[in-house]
Amino acid sequence: MRILLTGGAGFMGSNMVQYLLKQYDDVEVINFDLLTYAGNLENLADIQDHPRYTFVKGDIADARAVEDVVSKGVDLLLNYAAETHVDRSLMDPRAFLHTNVYGTHTLLEAAKKYEVPRFVQISTDEVYGAVMEGESDEKSPFEPRSPYSASKAAADHLCHSYHISFGVPVMVTHSANFYGPYQFPEKLIPLFVCNLLEGKTVPIYGDGQQIREWIFTQDHCRAIDLIAQKGNAGETYNIGTGERLPNLEVTRKLLALTGRDDASMVFVKDRRGHDRRYALCSQKLRSELGWKPQMAFDDGLAQTVEWYRTNQPWVARCRSGEYQQYYQRQYQER
Ligand code: TYD
């Protein structure tokens, strides 16, 4: 079985490459990744010479590069390639449209042309917008509120349209916020862990009472695997854990795990259009495909902090180059 996994050098993609090679003896994984700022082949150093693993550097919006791979035969396409950081989308939306919208479209075209039999689109709960009460289920309307979530919503709509119009067997997944080892230190959990381990402060947007739902990498890998094998083409699946916490509570847990106190928290200007709460109903995935999360948030958080503690050189390499410019710019804008 040949799997084309796009974005396999990123956080979630690289975790999935590792998962697939460990889990199955008969899969071949082609990692197609542009190696932008958040892509890091170091995440895959231990499998770079694996006989069933190939790396191809390329842009998913480049039709020729995509067709080069897909034309050789692909049994499953997992689209992890995406620009994912909301704050970056507020500063530079164009890259989000390029990769998330045109990139997904290019993959769908290739899947249509070469009749790829399974396609899973990795997407986010953010397409549903802020949910002030209750939960978003698969039938909830899309109400994206940031350039990032708007680009993912557009891509998800394209996926459905390609299923309806052309019969491309694509499934769309909306996931809660990921966390775990190897996550680039710009999102809440890895940024705060790295700052705290280095004795720096952490910037809390607004009042810190915004609520996010959290899922550990491995639980997400198992969900995607299940959906790829048993999901119905054209369907949408939410992947949620019910582990919903205000950012301030997550921060306090991180302070405790790193031996810091409230003095490390700095309340800064709120994010523009900051979504107040996300909450997913994942009953469909649980009842139809038998998935449930295995990692409790406190355990996953402790493992994550431990990983960053023992991988400081990895963090230092992430935090060099373009990273400094990004933070400088964000700092000025605040
Ligand atoms: P983030 O990790 O960027 O994920 P998303 O916005 O896609 O959910 O942010 C998670 C929450 O943490 C969100 O409510 C914004 C907040 N946040 C901060 O308070 N400070 C920060 O420095 C970052 C990056 C996020």
Image: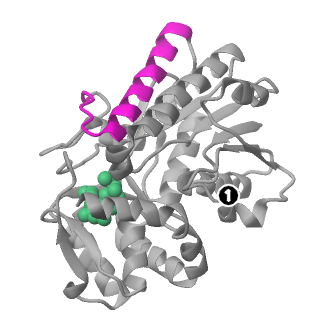
| Residue lying at the far bottom of the rendered structure | 259
Q: Nearer the viewer, residue 157 or 236?
A: 157
Q: Residue sitting at 69 percent across and 39 percent down? A: 58
Number of callouts: 1
First to last magenta residue range: 140-166
Left or right of 170, for residue 241: left
Q: Residue sitting at 43 percent across and 77 percent down? A: 194
Residue bearing mark 1? 18
Point out the quarter of the image occupied by ligand 1.
Answer: bottom left
**SS at badge 1:** helix
Above/below status of 187 relative to 102:
below
Q: Picture coordinates of residue 329 (x, y %)?
A: 35, 59
- Whether 229 is among the magenta residues is no
Q: Badge 1, how many Cα within 10 Å: few under 14, some, many 20+?
A: some
Is residue 298 shown to the viewer in this render? Answer: yes
Left or right of 218, for residue 153: left
Q: Residue sitting at 55 percent across and 65 percent down? A: 321
Is residue 282 shown to the viewer in this render? Answer: no
Q: Residue sitting at 42 percent across and 85 percent down? A: 198
Q: Residue 170 appears in which quarter of the rendering?
A: top right
Specify the quadrant that holds the N terminus: top right
Three-letter code for the amino acid on which mark 1 is drawn: Gln
Left or right of 115, for residue 182: left
Above/below status of 70 relative to 279:
above
